[in-house]
């Protein structure tokens, strides 16, 4: 390891960026950015949401063009007019959001991402060879809808590797992976590094950065503010460099009460589509002032549970009781009027309409609770004021309430969506992946806001794949596995081994045998 790093110190950069600037109306996304990435190096790109990371990698990958500055690959000018040109230059990119068709198989999805795919049989053979060589086994004939989140990510990685990239860009690659899948991914990235591939790695998980990355470039406000050797810096120090000040850990200010805020009794729900998950006899009791944490590997019923809570889907069996009132047959609007708010995992298209402004998106969920309509007419002044309060309180980086939701970075939209629900002071709030894709400062702010909401007497349900987050927030913890919910256990004192057994369904099986 030491010899490799000594060699890296004298190696010429594969990617060299000098003075790159990119501005949009009202904001400078990148301001004179310098960056170099060497062959055989895993280089972290760190920064708050809105710091300019996405814009920078989009320029490298040919999705946007810089206003000024230069980019070079192996010393030759790099100015790709499209992703196809970037791939031809030896650059691959694995995006945070998968672009896969669930009804097609693995090979068909890979072929759709290629400009000139080989015959089906040859492509399937090549997929199997590459996936096996890099410890990412894939069956080319498997239907994507039947795959886990980790397996779907393998498709994106293998598709990029088929192009034999010299530089691989990874954007939040572990956000939906289990700890075991993260280990597999890291082994693959280290193998690529040993083969001389350069990797530009974007993540908000700072302990992962410290374990994996050789160097880091840190952006703040579109400018490079520091470079670092992550293994020699603490996660707290990296976070401080990103945000410009010291971060405080979220603090709990209240305790659970005896009063019940929400109760589910043997709730069952069939899958919404061929690749969905059925819910089986889900029961839980949420008290006022309590935070219930629900963990689970992606695809085990998280989306279905939130849909059943919100009223988007009415369960044919079981009941939902809110503040003592049976709301089992009531839809989302009626449940919201009674004080139940939800924030789903999918930001664009579900939690927010991309072509609508932030003001209009505020109206969608806050109209009744914030009295944004009068006699059937929208009070746009009050609606804009509410949206502006959310933007200010949760530090959403945007030009203002009139900005379209789709124009925000993923992390900033996440802050807005979660903030919009918290700002309504609901009696019960259920959130799925509340800090997905947000920076350390924003994650701390969201978590503190959830704890503050519980301290004010609300009941809070947090569904997340981030186990550290769940242990930090939860009073009690349960796991979803195959649409079944384990018994809840006190979160303080739970070991990772116990949590792993719960995620694997061991607790639920024990409960079934006992009954």
Image (spheres, rainbow, N blue to C red):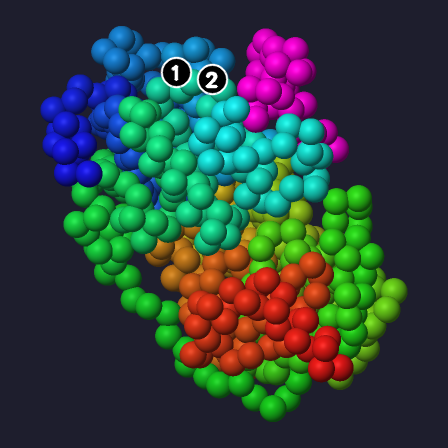
Q: Is 414 rendered above or below residue 117?
A: below
Q: Is 8 rendered above or below residue 184?
A: above
Identify the image quadrant of the N terminus: top left
- In the visual, does 138 lie left or right of 71? right
Q: Quadrant of residue 117?
A: top right
Tag on residue 163?
2
Residue at 14% x, 33% y: name it. 3
N-terminal-most mark, 1 or 2: 1
Residue at 17% x, 19% y: name it. 12
Around disc 2, counting alpha carbons within 10 Å, would you say few (fewer than 14), some (14 to 19), or many (20 or more)? some
- In the visual, does 58 lie left or right of 260? left
Residue 113 belongs to the span the image colors magenta: yes
For the residues carrying marks 1 and 2, which lies nearer the camera in this image? Answer: 2
Around disc 1, counting alpha carbons within 10 Å, would you say few (fewer than 14), some (14 to 19), or many (20 or more)? some
Identify the image quadrant of the C terminus: bottom right
- Tell me the residue that label 1 is attached to: 90
Q: Is residue 159 visible?
A: no
Q: Are marks 1 and 2 in contact (CB under 8 Å)?
A: yes
């Amino acid at each position: 390891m030491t010899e490799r790093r000594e060699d890296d110190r004298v190696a010429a950069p594969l990617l060299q960026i000098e003075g790159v600037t990119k501005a949009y109306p009202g904001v400078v996304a990148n301001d004179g950015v310098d960056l170099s990435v060497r062959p055989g190096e895993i280089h972290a790109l760190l920064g708050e949401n809105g710091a300019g990371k996405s814009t920078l990698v989009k320029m490298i990958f040919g999705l946007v063009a810089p206003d000024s500055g230069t980019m070079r690959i192996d010393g030759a000018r790099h100015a790709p007019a499209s992703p196809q040109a970037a791939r031809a230059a030896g650059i691959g990119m694995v995006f945070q959001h998968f672009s896969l068709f669930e009804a097609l198989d693995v090979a068909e999805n890979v072929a759709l991402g290629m400009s000139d795919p080989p015959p089906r049989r040859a492509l399937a053979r090549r997929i199997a060879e590459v996936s096996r060589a890099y410890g990412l086994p894939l069956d080319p004939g498997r239907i994507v809808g039947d795959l886990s989140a980790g397996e779907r990510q393998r498709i994106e990685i293998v598709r990029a590797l088929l192009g034999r990239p010299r530089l691989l860009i990874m954007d939040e690659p572990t956000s939906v992976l289990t700890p075991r899948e993260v280990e597999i991914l890291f082994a693959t990235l280290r193998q690529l590094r040993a083969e001389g591939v350069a990797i530009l790695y974007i993540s908000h998980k700072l302990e992962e950065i410290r374990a994996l990355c050789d160097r880091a470039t840190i952006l703040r406000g579109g400018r490079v503010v520091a470079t670092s050797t992550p293994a020699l810096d603490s996660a707290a120090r990296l976070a401080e460099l990103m945000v410009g000040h010291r971060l405080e850990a979220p603090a709990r200010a209240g305790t659970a009460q005896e009063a019940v805020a929400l109760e589910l009794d043997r709730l069952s729900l069939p899958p919404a589509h061929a690749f969905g998950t059925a819910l089986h006899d889900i029961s839980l009791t949420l008290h006022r002032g309590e935070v219930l944490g629900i963990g689970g590997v992606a695809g085990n019923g998280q989306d279905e549970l939130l849909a059943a809570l919100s009223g988007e889907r009415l369960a044919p069996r079981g009941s939902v009781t809110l503040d003592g009132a049976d709301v089992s047959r009531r839809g989302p609007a009626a449940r919201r009027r009674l004080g139940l708010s939800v924030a789903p995992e999918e930001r664009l298209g579900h939690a927010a309409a991309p072509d609508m402004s932030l003001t209009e998106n505020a109206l969608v969920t806050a109209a009744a609770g914030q009295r944004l309509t009068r006699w059937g007419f929208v009070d746009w002044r009050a609606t804009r004021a509410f949206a502006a309060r959310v933007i200010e309180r949760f530090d959403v980086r945007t030009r203002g309430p009139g900005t379209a939701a789709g124009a925000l970075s993923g992390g900033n939209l996440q802050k807005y969506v979660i903030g919009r629900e918290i700002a309504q002071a609901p009696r019960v709030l259920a959130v799925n992946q509340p800090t997905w894709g947000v920076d350390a400062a924003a994650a701390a702010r969201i978590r503190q806001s959830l704890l503050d909401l519980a301290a004010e007497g609300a009941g809070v349900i947090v569904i997340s794949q981030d186990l550290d987050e769940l242990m930090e927030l939860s009073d009690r913890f349960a796991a979803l596995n195959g649409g079944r919910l384990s018994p809840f256990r006190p979160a303080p004192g739970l070991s990772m081994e116990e949590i792993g057994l719960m995620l694997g369904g061991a607790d639920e099986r024990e409960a079934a045998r006992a009954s």
